[in-house]
């Protein structure tokens, strides 16, 4: 078994343990490469079917191609797609693009707060109708108490402190000092009632592993990751006002793999194009302690 197969097998195992151990699960889908690989692995773990809803937090400032890609794939793969949003902050223009918040404040309102309230069902949730292709307000929404997310420990400093099964407080806050040990692939899935759980099947994958797996499996990936002829591409994708491309002529998955293998990007942080990270001192720890992915 090669290394990619080992990573795949471990991720599939984590998925199945989570599904066996926790009720009211959902999976976050940001439309990026990592969470799309996560979605692919979920289909493998459950023989082509994803048995829990996918949740996307729509800030209304995402790069437009991301939303089109989300809905196209959700329809093609017959996914239970739920979208959450902080409609109050958007209506009151409490955002960075409106000039009424810093980037971090905007992220907290449109991502952290929106995620928290979408998960606990106190904000309205929209669900994709697979017959019409339209989003409708979800009726009788129930809280999600277990959340599967596609974070990787090598992507950003605060994520290296994570666990495969990570307990959160009821408010989704992350207490780094209370993370349980996970030694010799022994995972704790027995938590006190009411504990909010985050599950991270991709924790040990690297950026290179992700792209190698995309190539091996021929996973459909949003074209924003590839040079469209301007000598730039996105290495990480998010909200348009705070996400910037890198200089790169990589037009295919093998091109990106070659970039990573040769070390061309070794001195450039993967999320260097995400302006909110720089505002948080080069990391995401402040936002993540408040429940951000």
Image (tube, grey):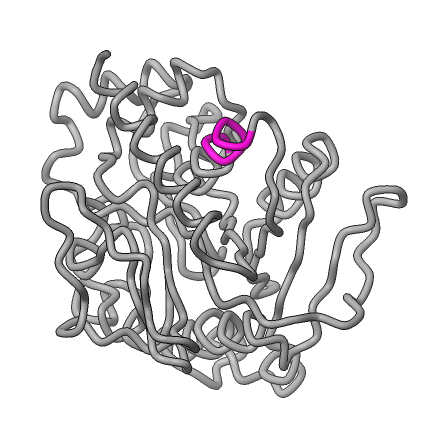
Residue 277, given in percent of the width and then of the height, sits at 27, 63
Instruction: Give how far across and how far down residue 48 sits, in percent.
Output: 60, 27
Q: Is residue 41 magenta?
A: yes
Q: Residue 4 colored magenta?
A: no
Magenta span? 40-46
The image quadrant where one finds the N terminus is top left
Q: Nearer the viewer, residue 188 or 114?
A: 188
- The spot of residue 253 in percent (x, y) is 38, 19
Which residue sits at x=35%, y=21%? Answer: 213
Asked if 171 appears above or below 143 in the picture, the reply is: below
Q: Residue at x 66, y 34 (%)?
A: 73
Q: Quadrant of residue 177?
A: bottom left
Main secondary-structure element of the magenta-colored stretch: helix
Q: Is residue 17 above or below residue 232?
A: below
- Residue at 25 percent across and 71 percent down: it is 279
Quadrant showing the C terminus: bottom left
Counting from the top left corner in percent of width and height, residue 64 is at 62, 48
Q: Quadrant of residue 276?
A: bottom left
């Amino acid at each position: 078994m090669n290394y990619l197969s080992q990573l795949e097998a471990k991720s599939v195992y984590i998925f199945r343990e989570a599904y066996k151990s926790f009720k009211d699960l959902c999976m976050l889908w940001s439309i990026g490469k990592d969470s799309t690989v996560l979605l692919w692995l979920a289909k493998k773990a459950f023989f082509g079917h994803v048995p829990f809803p996918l949740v996307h937090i729509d800030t209304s400032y995402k790069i437009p191609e991301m939303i089109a890609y989300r809905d196209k794939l959700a329809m093609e793969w017959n996914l239970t797609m739920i979208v959450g949003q902080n409609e109050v902050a958007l209506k009151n223009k409490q955002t960075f693009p409106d000039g009424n918040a810093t980037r971090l404040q905007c992220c907290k309102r449109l991502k952290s707060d929106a995620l928290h309230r979408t998960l606990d069902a106190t904000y309205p949730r929209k669900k994709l109708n697979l017959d019409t292709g339209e989003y409708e307000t979800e009726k009788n929404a129930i809280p999600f108490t277990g959340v599967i997310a596609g974070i990787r420990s090598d992507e950003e400093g605060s994520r290296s402190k994570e666990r495969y099964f990570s307990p959160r407080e009821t408010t989704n806050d992350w207490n780094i000092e209370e993370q349980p040990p996970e030694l010799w692939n022994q995972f704790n899935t027995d938590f006190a009632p009411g504990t909010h759980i985050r599950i991270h099947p991709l924790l040990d994958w690297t950026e290179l592993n992700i792209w190698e797996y995309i190539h091996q499996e021929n996973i459909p990936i949003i074209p924003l990751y590839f040079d469209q002829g301007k000598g730039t591409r996105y290495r990480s994708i998010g909200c348009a006002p705070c996400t910037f491309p890198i200089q790169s002529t990589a037009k295919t998955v093998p091109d990106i793999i070659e970039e990573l293998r040769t070390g061309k990007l070794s001195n450039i942080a993967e999320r260097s194009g995400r302006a909110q990270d720089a505002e948080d001192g080069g990391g995401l720890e402040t936002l993540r302690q408040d429940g951000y992915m």
